Amino acid sequence: MLAVMEMKELDNASQDNRRMYSVGELTRIIKSVLEDEIGMVWVEGEVSNLRKPASGHLYFTLKDDAAQIPVVFFRGSQRNSRVVPRDGMQIRVQGDVTVYMDRGQYQVVARKVEEAGKGSLQEAFEKLKARLAEEGLFDPGRKKPLPLLPRHIGVVTSRTGAAVRDILNILTRRFPDIHVVLAPVKVQGDGAAEEIAAAIDLLNRREDLDVLIVGRGGGSLEDLWAFNEEATARAIARSNLPVISAVGHEIDFTISDFVADLRAPTPSAAAELVIGTRQSFVDLLEGRQRQLADLLQRRVVEFQRRVDRAAHSYVFREPGNLLRGYRQDIEGIRFRLATSLKGAYAEVQQRLDEADMKLMYAVRSIRRDRQQQLERMTSQLRALNPLAVLQRGYSVTRRKDGSVITRPDDVTKGDEIETLIAGGSLTSTVTQSSKEKHHGQG
């Protein structure tokens, strides 16, 4: 009896001292512990149950054989991500471990998403980038300028990719007589970097090239990896020709971009950077002409001032012949500068006119070929036209339903038929078929 009373007293005491939490308080404590003790993590797993509501946020589950965890990838964080999760994809997520209060559910708020397996590639990229930067391969001082108007351009890329088509399309549209040398290579996979490096070295041994474009179209990090390898970077660095790196899309950066003399965001942009439009060259020449004219005018004014000062000095008051000689020298300098400027402008203008003439002849030739081809096809269609047979005295007879009559047995007395002849048709009624005629004679 005593023991029971003591137990009741202990139970009453325990109830008096217990701490009661609300659901919200307890959930906030758990949330705080998770965020403080775990915080930012990397977690790898398979995407499932992916949802993308109208808000643009992504909600999915990251799972493996042992467990699963909800993940939210807010739209603002997606802007810096090149990977779009999809169901079944194996990914790595960097994010904050937290608790969604409304459901009392722990989750990861993703900050960065990458495909599984890319972490090692990114680490290799950063290590090589740091080592080459330390060697000075990225220094602006070693960058070579591009030629103003290159006439021979080397291209290192895939023979069948979209990159080479885009480059050739832009170059030939701007200057039809431009000379392009393609060194076809693999741009991804085993041995691609070695092929690219060998092609760069090969084109450097030619004596007719002015600049190189090295690159490919867009793709994943693995697809672009040949342009992140040391062999490609070393070949670009030792190139005597200026190199434009044009790899992937605008958001893609490779080791080749840092080593090259100029980085283009896309292959098409590389073609636009390597050679300007005709109007840009005209504008440039006119600007240079104005600059030279202004410089010449300033030099003339300066020489004139010096001559005037000398003319009024004590030493040169008398020897007027010496003063006239200086004036003649000034006029000679002005004449030679003006003549040189006109000659250079005329030469460039002649090259532009020749390019226009070649383009005009090419367009005329294509139009003449298309006209001849159209005439041949028209002639063939006329020869095959069944109505042309009617012009030679033949006719076609058919029933009212449009079916053609090929034998006398196809009609009987009283049938209404239509005969097509050149220029129209005749409608008639059968009074006797050859079959009925023979039968009557029998």
Image: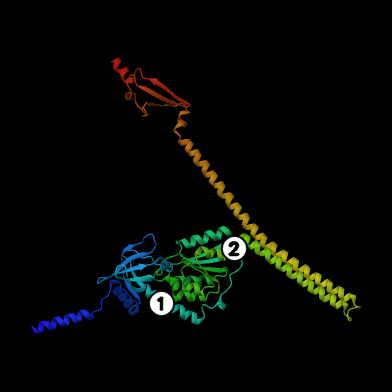
The foreground one among 82 and 400 is 82
Q: Is residue 248 above or below residue 433?
A: below
SS at mark 2 in the image: loop
Could you classify mark 1 by the number of other residues whose Cα lies within 10 Å: few (under 14), some (14-19), or many (20 or more)? Answer: few
Mark 2 or 1, nearer chain start:
1
For badge 1, the amino acid type reads: Ala
Picture quadrant where residue 25 is located: bottom left
Given contact means CB atoms under 8 Å apart, are the residues at marks 2 and 1 in contact? no
User: Where does the image place residue 95, in percent across and percent down from the top left?
Assistant: 36, 73
What number is the disc on residue 124?
1
User: Quick one: 215 or 126, which is closer to the camera?
Assistant: 126
Q: CA distance from mark 2 to mark 1?
A: 37 Å
Q: Position of residue 144 (x, y in %)?
A: 57, 74
Crowd tier of the residue under label 2, counting other residues whose Cα lies within 10 Å: few below 14, some 14–19, many 20 or above: some
Q: What's the amino acid at mark 2?
A: Gly
Q: Is residue 12 left or right of residue 103?
A: left
Give the residue at mark 2: 276
Percent x, y of residue 283:
65, 62
Locate the N terminus by quadrant.
bottom left
